[in-house]
Amino acid sequence: MEHALLVFALNGLLGGLACALLHAESFREVLSYTSVRAIHALLVFTLNGLLGGLACALLHAESFREVLSYTSVRAIVLGAVGGYIYYYMFTEWKLPDSVMAFVFGYAFKDFVEALYEKGRLLLGRGGRG
C-alpha cells in the first residue's frame, strides 16, 4: 500500500509538472511560484482523495486483513484517482476544495462501480434487442 501512495504522489507531481511545462514559455517560468503552487495543489488533491479512499476502506472493513484485500486497495487507489480528477473540477461552492477532494475520493469507488454496472446493463441490452 505504501507503494501505491508513492506512485500516486509521483503521478500528481508529474501531472502538475507536465501541466507547467505545457503552459510555460521558458524553463524559468516552470520554476515560478505559480507552477510550484499548481504542482503542490495537485499533490494535495491527490493525497486528499487517497485519504478519502482510505477512510472508505477502513469504515467498510471488519478486520485489518480486509483493509489489505483487493476491494479495500481498489477503494484507496480509486480515491486517489478521484482526488486527482477533482483537481481539474474545482467548485465554486463555499466548501474548502481539500474537503471536497476527500469526499470525492471517498465516494469515487461507488461512482465508478455504478457506471460500470450501468454500462454493462446497457451494453447487454443494446446489442440484442
Image (cartoon, grey):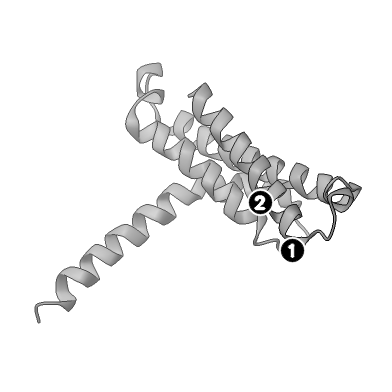
* Mark 1 / mark 2, whichever is N-terminal: 1
47 vs 67: above or below: below
Question: Where's residue 98, x and y in %?
Answer: 71, 46
Q: Amino acid at mark 2?
A: Met
- The quadrant in which residue 94 appears is bottom right
Residue bearing mark 1: 93
Residue situated furthest left in the rendering? 128
Question: Where's residue 91, x and y in %?
Answer: 71, 63
Q: Amino acid at mark 1?
A: Trp
Residue bearing mark 2: 100
Q: Nearer the viewer, residue 82 or 20?
A: 20
64 vs 103: above or below: above
Question: Where's residue 73, x and y in %?
Answer: 41, 32
Q: Are marks 1 and 2 in contact (CB under 8 Å)?
A: yes
Residue at 64% over, 48% down: 15
Q: Nearer the viewer, residue 56 or 50?
A: 50
Left or right, 49 with reference to 93? left
Residue situated furthest bottom in the rendering? 129
Residue at 70% over, 61% down: 90
Q: Residues within 10 Å of mark 1 (few under 14, many from 20)?
A: few
